[in-house]
Image (spheres, grey):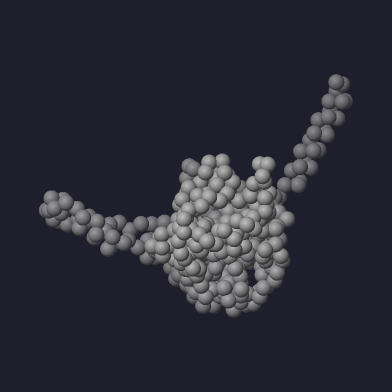
Amino acid sequence: MTVRAFLFTLFAALSVVRSASADLPDFTEIVDASSPAVVKILVEYQTDQSQYQDQMEELPEYLKRFFEFRGGPPVPRERAGMGSGFVVSQDGYVVTNNHVVDNARKVVVRLSDRREYDAEIIGTDPRSDLAVLKIEANGLTALSLADDADVKVGQWVLAIGSPFSLDFSVTAGIVSALGRSLPTESGDNYVPFIQTDVAINPGNSGGPLFNLDGEVIGVNSQIFTRSGGSIGLSFAIPASVVNNVVGQIQANGMVERGWLGVSIQDVDRNLADSFGLDRPRGALIAQVGEESPAERAGLLSGDVIVQFDGEDIETSADLPHVVGLIAPGKVCMALIIRDGTEQSLKVEIGGLAADQVARMDTGMSSDGATVLLGMRIAAADPAVLGELGLTGGVLVAEVEPKSPAAESGVREGDILTRLGSAPVSRMQDLREITADLTPGSSVPARLIRRGSPLFIGIRVPRSDD
C-alpha cells in the first residue's frame, strides 16, 4: 500500500468515527436542566415493637434472667434507608416508590443543592409501588411527565438517582422492551413496566427515567439481579400510570382502580384452535366473580377478550393493565370471542375494592368412573367441592401417560368443570359431551387445580392416530 493510499484509508476511517460520534446523544443539557428537580429520600423506619416483644417472650427462662441481670434486653435499633425521587410541582410535591417510604417513621427530602426538608407522606399505592410526598417549599424546579404512548423500543433513555448512596448519579441506556408484566407478591398486575438496560442499583428506586427531550417517561422501580447490583435489567413504572396514581392521591389521598372481576389466563395454540381463534391471542376468562361487573355485563367463563375499551388485548397480562387505568363507573366496550363467534358487550367498570371470590353454581350427583381422552374420571367428593367453593364438577382420578390429556397438561387430582362449550357438574354430563367431540379438533377443558381455575386445550385424536 502506498503512503497516499494509507493516508486516504486513515482519513476515511476517522471520518466514519467522527460521524458515528456526532450521532450519539449528548445528555449534558438534560442533566443540567433536570438535576435540580431530582431528590434523595432519607428514611427512618418504624420498628415493630410488638413483634420484638413476642420474640423476647419466646426466649428460654435462663436467657430472660440473663437480660434482667444485665439491666434488661437490648433495645431494637431503628432501621435507616434511602431512595430517590423527583419534584412534580413547584409547591413541593414529590414522587417516589412506595417501597422506599413504606413503614417510615420519618422521611427527609434532600435537594441537589443539599437543602433538606421533612416530608409528609400524602398517599401511597402499593399496587403500583408509587408514593406522593409533600415538602414545605416553593419555587422548586419541577419535572413534566411525557406521553408514554410515544416511547419506542431502542430509544435512548437516562436515569438520575442515588445508587448505593452515591448522590445524583447519571446513567444511560436504551429501552429494551415495553409492557413487561411483573406481578407483585399478592398477585397484583396493574403496571406495564418499561424495561431498560440503564444501570439501576439500590438507591435508584423512585428516581426519574428521562427521554431525550428531558421529559419523565417512567419512575425507576425494580431491578433483576443475581448479585445485588445491576446486570442490565431494570424496570420503570410508565408515565401514564404515574399520572393516574399521582393525580388521584393529590385529589383524594387514595387510589381507586378499574375492576372487572374475572380470573384470566393466556391462550396457547391448542386453546386458540379450541376457541376458533386465528392465532394465540387475548385474555381467556377462567372464572367470573359473583356480582362482579363482568357477571352483570354477561361475560362468561370461556370467553376470550381480544379488545377492551379500544385497546387490543394480545396476552392476559394486557387486560389488567388496561382495566386498571379506567375510572370506576365508565362504560366500555369489550370485544370477545364466544363459541368461535365475535361479539361486543358493554361493561360498566367497577372499583377494585369490590373484589370478591367467585363461586360456581352447578348441580352435583355421582356415578361410576369413565375414561375420556386419557383421563379416568370419577365422581368428586362433595366435601372437596365445597372447600373449593364448587357445587359441581368431576375428579380426574388418573391420567394415562402419552394420552391426549397428558400431552395437554391435565394432572391427576384436577377437577373438571367444563368440556367444550358445556358445563360438567356430574358424571352423566360426560355422555352427551363425548358424542359431540370431533376427531382432530381441539376441545377446551376447564379445570380447578389447587383452588385456581384454568383452561387447557385437549386435542381429540383421529381414529388413525
Question: Quadrant of residue 237 in the image?
Answer: bottom right
Front in this rendered view, residue 422 or 178: 422
Q: Residue furthest top?
A: 1
Q: Is residue 239 visible?
A: no
Q: Position of residue 407 (x, y in %)?
A: 58, 44
Q: Position of residue 176 (x, y in %)?
A: 65, 49
Say whether residue 282 is left or right of residue 207: right
Q: In which quadrant is the C terminus drawn? A: top right
Q: Residue at x 79, y 35 (%)?
A: 14
Front in this rendered view, residue 447 or 396: 396
Q: Position of residue 55 (x, y in %)?
A: 24, 56
Q: In which quadrant is the N terminus drawn? A: top right
Front in this rendered view, residue 423 or 149: 423
Say whether residue 150 is left or right of residue 168: right
Say whether residue 63 is left or right of residue 276: left
Q: Residue at x 46, y 64 (%)?
A: 365
Q: Is residue 23 visible?
A: yes
Q: Position of residue 267 (x, y in %)?
A: 63, 55
Question: Quadrant of residue 349 in the image?
Answer: bottom right
Front in this rendered view, residue 66 or 294: 294
Q: Residue at x 50, y 59 (%)?
A: 427
Numbered-mark total:
0
Q: Residue at x 48, y 53 (%)?
A: 369
